[in-house]
Image (cartoon, rainbow, N blue to C red):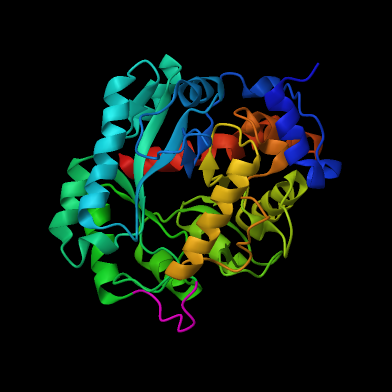
Amino acid sequence: MLTRRQLVAALATAPIAARVRAQTTNYPPYRGAIVVDALGGPGDPDQADPAAPLSARALADAKASGITLCNQTVAVGGDSWDEALRGFAFWQRELDAHPDAFVKVTRGAHIAQAQGSGRMGLVFGVQGLSYIGEDLARLDTLHDLGLRIAQLTYNVRALTGDGCLEPGNAGISRFGRRLIEHAEERRMIIDLSHGGRRTIAEAVAAAKMPFITHTGCAALVDHPRNVPDEILRAVAQKGGVVGIYFMPFLRPAGQQHLDDVVRHIEHAVNAAGEDHVGIGTDGVISTVVVDDKYRKAFAEQVQRRRKLGISAPGEVEDVYTFVPELNDPRRLETLGAALAKRGFSDARVLKILGGNFARGFAEALG
């Protein structure tokens, strides 16, 4: 007999259920593998207050996920300086409160430490840096607090350069170049996600080892958040890694599915090589239950983003930002099994699930 929660979930997802198979995947190579979500982390979608401590469910799902390392967003471009600092303080408190679950990652050796202890490594990242203004001393302050992944822009124009929604596509600024140099001197990782195509191309040329933690392939879906093949190749040539996300922009319209994720991974591997492709889900680990409460909150979020001018094409109220077949803490195991079924060797699958980002992050962090 279905539980009430299972029944609600089944009814809520009925419009897309025809594309969803029951996932009871067992992909043996996943056990003990280094698994990296280059943009994602612990979180409980049912938790109404984002400032509340991690719930017991979020902690249990993080431990059950099998993920070794997450790029945990602690601040976003629209935040004020005080809001950004509160984000760093929140995640530091969570790390301090749960040393049995998490390892703070500030250098390469910490990734191996997380793997060896069976805990999840969290590396602090930000999506945009508008709150530092042109004060690089503030970037140093954030580095002292643990910041190791710095995303230059978030969709719109910033002092560092143009985001992907700016029609001018003016590229990286002089300040952006100074910031890249300053950050890399401190062994911080430059993340070019959400950048305009000229900004990304110029930043790739300027950075020693650039990364794009969460994106898709523009050759498959020509969307502002996706990147063309020449960018995929340029990042690879610098030794970086590109993460494929689970967002709606993997298809021209409608709900994205597992086959869309696989298609973009296959294309990225063909363009950049199997050593330079990974996963950045852009979502929380715990399962999303699509009930009336979730629908209302999600619609309000989309409408709020539109008003702020940061909503990308394809962000609509009834297309959710998770993949139905991968809506589970063990989602990356399910993805691994799907890639193996498509003919990928286990060695290639494990590179994509985490080996590539683990290697690249460790090298960049020192």
Horizontally, residue 12 falls left or right of residue 286, namely right
x, y (%) of residue 4?
70, 23
Q: Residue at x 82, y 34 (%)?
A: 21
Asked whether the viewer can see residue 106, the reply is: no
Q: Is residue 163 highlighted in magenta?
A: no
Indicate the quadrant where residue 1 lies. Answer: top right
Asked whether the viewer can see residue 60, the reply is: yes
Closer to us: 172 or 318: 318
Q: Residue at x 75, y 28 (%)?
A: 7
Indicate the quadrant where residue 228 lies. Answer: bottom right
For the view shown, which residue lies furthest in the bottom direction? 168
What is the chief secondary structure element of the magenta stretch? loop
x, y (%) of residue 300?
53, 56
Q: Is 28 situated above or below 164?
A: above
Horizontally, residue 117 falls left or right of residue 272, namely left
Residue span colored magenta? 165-172
Q: How many marks?
A: 0
Rendered-image quadrant of the C terminus: top left
Q: Residue at x 21, y 60 (%)?
A: 132
For the view shown, which residue lies furthest in the right direction? 18
Indicate the quadrant where residue 109 lies. Answer: top left
Q: Is residue 166 highlighted in magenta?
A: yes
Q: Is 222 situated above or below 285?
A: below
Q: Residue at x 62, y 27 (%)?
A: 330
x, y (%) of residue 10?
76, 33
x, y (%) of residue 35?
54, 31
